Image (tube, coloured by chain):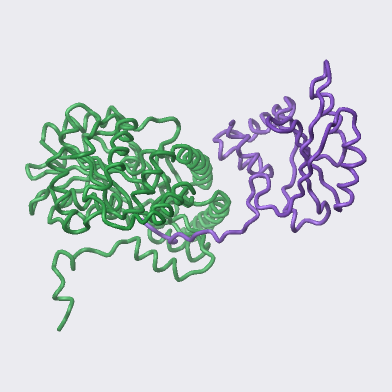
Chain colours: A green, B purple
Amino acid sequence: MDLHTQIASHVRDLPRSGIRDFFEIVQSMKEVISLGIGEPDFDTPWNIREAAIYSLERGHTGYTSNLGLPDLRTRISEYVHRHFHVGYDPKTEILVTVGVSEAIDLALRALLNPGDEVLYHEPCYVSYSPSIVLARGVPVAVATREEENFSLTAEALAKKITPASKVLMLNFPCNPTGATQSRAELEKIARLCIQHNLIVLTDEIYSELTYDGQPHTSIAALPGMRERTVFLHGFSKAFAMTGFRVGYACAPEPLTEAMMKIHQYSILCANTMAQDAAIEALENGGKDVDRMRKEYELRRNFIVRSLNEMGLECFKPHGAFYVFPKITSTGLTSREFSLGLLEKKQVACVPGTAFGPSGEGFIRCSYATGLEQIKVAMQRMAEFVQETKARSGAKA
Amino acid sequence: MDPLLTLLRNNARVPIEDLAKELNCEAADVRDKIAQLEADGVILGYQAVLDPLVAPGHAVTACIEVKVTPERGGGFDRLAQRIAKFAEVQGCYLMSGGYDLLVVVEGDTLQEVATFISEKLSTIKGVVSTATRFRLKAYKENGVSLVKEAKSRRLVVSP
C-alpha cells in the first residue's frame, strides 16, 4: 500500500517549513554561530522554574479545568487589563492554551467554514498560512514593504478584501521583521474590519518587547474592536518560557466557548505545572522582563548599526528580537546568501523566503543570542558581504 | 542605573566602539562620558574578578564582625576609616543589626589573618569585640557565578 496516497490531500499538499529545511542543514554542521534562533536565549527566571518544581512537590499533577486554572485566568485578566487596556471575564472569556500556536489553531478552526478567506500580512510567522489551510480556509497574504518598515497599511489591506474575507490575522511586533504598528494605522485597519465585518486574530506574543520607549497598542483596545477580536498572548517570549508551552486566548464568550470545545476534545487542558509557573511569572516576573528587554535593546542597537556599516540596509525595528536586513546589494537571493554565509563563515541566519515569498531579498537575524556571539557573527558576515561583492565585481 | 554603567559593571573591557554601537551613540560621546564618570568619582576603578579557588595568592578571606564604641564628634566614621586604611582590609562597612562594622580581610595564610585581627584590629581603641568568620568556598564573586553550569542548548534554528 502506498501510504502517501492515504494522507489527506490538504495535508499532503502542505509544503515543508522552510525553517525546518534549513535547520537540518545547520544541524549537520559544527561550530556554527546561530542567529536563527526564534526563542529567548535567557533561561527562564529562577523563581518561575522554582514555582514549577514546587508545583510538582505539592502533587499538582492532575488535570485542570478545561479553561485553565481559575487563579491563572484571574491574573491573566488583570495583566491584560493593566497592559493592554481591555477587560475580559476570567470565568468565560479567557482560555489557557498550549502556547499561542494552539490558540491560533483553535481560533481558526472555530471560525472558518471551508472557503472562508483569511487575510494576514507577510513576511509572517511560518505557521499562519498552513494553519489556515489545515482549518480549510483560504490564505490571502498582504505583502508588507520595507519602505513602510514592514507595517501593514490599511490601503494594502483594503485591496485584498473580498466578500469571502472573514478573518484578519495580525502579529505586531512581528516575527520575522521586528515591525510594529502605529496606533493611527491600527485605527484605520480597525475601521476597515468593522466596515467589512472581519474578525481579528491578533497574536501579540512579542508585545512586551518593544524598544525606544514606544508604547504597544493592541487593536483589541480600539473602539468597537473588542467584540470582534481574539486577543492571543502567552509567556514564551517575554518571560523566556518557550518550553513551558503556555499561551492564552481572550475573546467574547461565544468565541471562547467555541474554541474551548475544540481544546477540550483535542487537548483537555494545558500542562498543570506550567500553569503554576505562569502564575508566578505574572505575579513576580515584571523585573526580569524589564532586564531582558534592556539587554535585547542594546543588542538590537549593535546589530542594526553593524549591518548598515557592512552595507546591508536594515531599518531599525522597534519590537521583537529580530532584524530583517536587505541583502539584494550582494546580488544573491535570500537562500543563496544564507547558505553561502553558513558554508563559508559558519553563521546561520534564516532566509526571508521561509516567511513567505515576499521575504525574498531579506534574511532574518535573531538577536536572541549573547552579545559576544553577535559580535563575532557580525564580523564574519561583514567579511562574507565584502568577499561576495568583490567576487561579483570581478565578474562584471 | 545608567545603561553605560550597567555595561561597564558587567564588563569594563568592552571596546569603546562596541559600547557606542550598543548604546546607539558615537564613540567620542562614550569616551567623554566615561572620563566624566571617573572625574566625578562615580567610577572608582577597574579590577579583574578572580576565582579565589584557582587564583594564586590571597588564599584566606575572613569577614569580621566588629563592635565598636562610637566616638563623640566622630561617630563611627573616624574609627571605620582608621580600620579601612590597613592594606589587609578589602572592604569595610557600617552595618545595621547586632554589630557595627563588617570588615573583610584578605591574607596569604590563616596565621597572617589571625595576627592582623589579634594584634592590629582588636587593639585599636574603641574596638569592643570581634567575631571572625573564615570563608570556606566561593560560589559567586562580584556577580560572576563560579559554578560552571552547562548552558541549556537551544535548537540552532527555530521559527
Q: In which quarter of the image is the N terminus of chain B?
A: top right
Residue A328 visible, this orientation: no
Left or right: A309, with A81 as reference point? right
Q: Nearer the viewer, residue A203 or A273?
A: A273
> Which residue, as the protein is rendered here, is positioned at the far bottom?
A1
- Residue B103: quadrant of the picture: top right
Where is residue A275 shown, x and y percent of the image?
33, 49
Q: Residue A319 appears in which quarter of the rendering?
A: top left
> Relative to A243, does residue B15 appear above or below in the rendering?
above
Q: Measured from the top left, where is residue B67 in percent x and y?
A: 79, 32
Picture residue at 56% right of the left edge, 40% below the top = B22
Q: Nearer the viewer, residue A95 or A54?
A: A54
Q: Which of B137 and A141 is in front in this view?
A: B137
B74 is higher (above) or lower (below) than A389: above
Q: In which quarter of the image is residue B81?
A: top right
Seen at 17% across and 78% down, the residue is: A3
Query: A140 left or right of A56?
Result: left
Vertical order, A379 against A183 (above or below): below
Residue under the point 61% across and 59% down = B148
Rendering coords of residue A288 (x, y %):
48, 41
The mark total stands at 0
Q: Who's the residue at 24% across and 44% down the image?
A: A249
Quadrant where the image shows the C terminus of chain B:
bottom left
Let me know if residue A84 appears in the view. Answer: yes
Residue A368: % across, % down: 46, 50
